[in-house]
Image (cartoon, grey):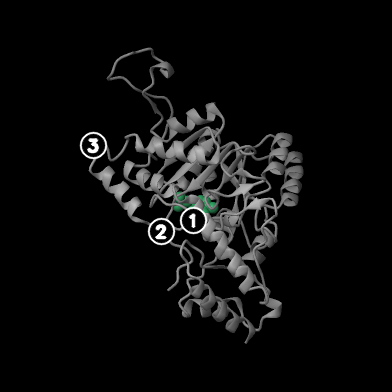
Amino acid sequence: MIPYSRQNINNEDIESVIDVLKSDYITQGNIINKFEDAVAKKVNSSYSYAMNSATSALHISCLALGLNSDDILWTVPNSFVASANCGLYCGAKVDFVDINPISFNISLNALSDKLIKAKKTNSLPKIVVTVDFSGQPVEQEAIKSLSIEYGFYIIEDASHAIGAKRNNNMVGCNMFSDITVFSFHPVKIVTTAEGGMALTQNKEIAEKIDLLRGHGITKNYKNYEKKIDEHWYYEQQYLGYNYRLSEVHSALGLSQLNRLDEFIGYRNNVAKIYDKLLNDLPIQLPNIESVNYSSFHLYVIRLKLDKIKKSYNEIFNGLRNNGIGVNLHYLPIHLHPFYRSIGFKVGDFPESEKYSNEAISLPIFFELKEEEQDYIYKKLKDLLIT
Ligand SMILES: *Cc1c(COP(=O)(O)O)cnc(C)c1O
């Protein structure tokens, strides 16, 4: 089976992990700081905190922005459930904004309309989580203008988009977001096995994130409430969590980061080859805005079902039966049984629902071969036009 994504681990990655295993510190050493600094430098952010997953980083980001049970968080239905769950972890109410059918990212029109209505009913969100879907950056500068007008924070869930750029600004620079989150799960662009990171330009938010990912404990005298300057002393100031990333995982991430540009260059080349191969088929190909450089975490095609004799399932299963590990990103979050149980239903977000009935993620990863792409093209063509 050709998977839709997979990690690429080389000897340098392996050596760097072995070095840590032979060292004194396999957690809470200084490799995590090196990894954090390297990511921050790469994407032009000031503060960066590695955690054991992007899900943890999203949770801590919400807490650091003060989200609680009086608040509302909005995100898009077309994402992994973690983009919404993070709000529920904090006791907040979660709602969704529909997507743009071309970019598959948040719809600016839907967001503006929903904000106008929410202002009238006094139900504005405290946080909007935008998602750089498939690696294509969101129109974040427009969202930022709305955030100033309506007074909400922006968390950019860039789990797909480390290394992507918009108007030549790196995703993660936080020019138009309060916090950006990356994921280092093996299907993502670079991996730490499990892992994530939250980045910000705001010192106050940064200090809060740092505390909350480590039990809410500070060991820094200058921040103590009680001025006890003794080696045995530390203070828990908030209810935090143990969401730290180990030295072993950090070493893998630091080593992987050396190849970020290579990984993304390769993925863009795979996308270019698909664009050419698939051009004549009854499908909508990815539309990357000219000001965007996508990291191409995903290559999503949308079937034009009115021009195809077969059903979605026949095509999806046909590809799987031919050893092509296609996937759906995403079943809309609000249609999962859990979200239905808290009141969402079919018809709530029609663009996301229509999209999910037509979308297929084709394999894309570092070292996917051109022969494999040819094979995928041929099988897809057979299924689509017979
Ligand atoms: C993968 C992913 C996450 C969660 O990442 P983990 O590191 O597995 O917790 C969150 N949001 C999006 C959009 C993702 O793709």
Relative to 248, 319 lies left or right: right
Q: Nearer the viewer, residue 379 or 153?
A: 379
* In this view, 109 is above or below 3: above
* In this view, 189 is above or below 213: below
Q: CA distance from mark 2 to mark 3?
A: 27 Å
Q: Nearer the viewer, mark 1 or mark 3?
A: 1
Toward which corner of the image does residue 141 lie, by quadrant?
Answer: top right
* In this view, 86 is above or below 294: above
Q: Nearer the viewer, residue 49 or 289?
A: 289
Q: Are marks 1 and 2 in contact (CB under 8 Å)?
A: yes
Q: Amino acid at mark 3?
A: Asp
The residue indicated by pointer 1 is 263
The residue indicated by pointer 3 is 24
Along the polypeptide, which appears first: circle 1 or circle 3?
A: 3
The residue indicated by pointer 2 is 8
Does the Cβ of the disc 3 residue fall within 8 Å of ligand 1? no
- Seen at 41% across and 47% down, the residue is 195
Residue 370: which disc? none
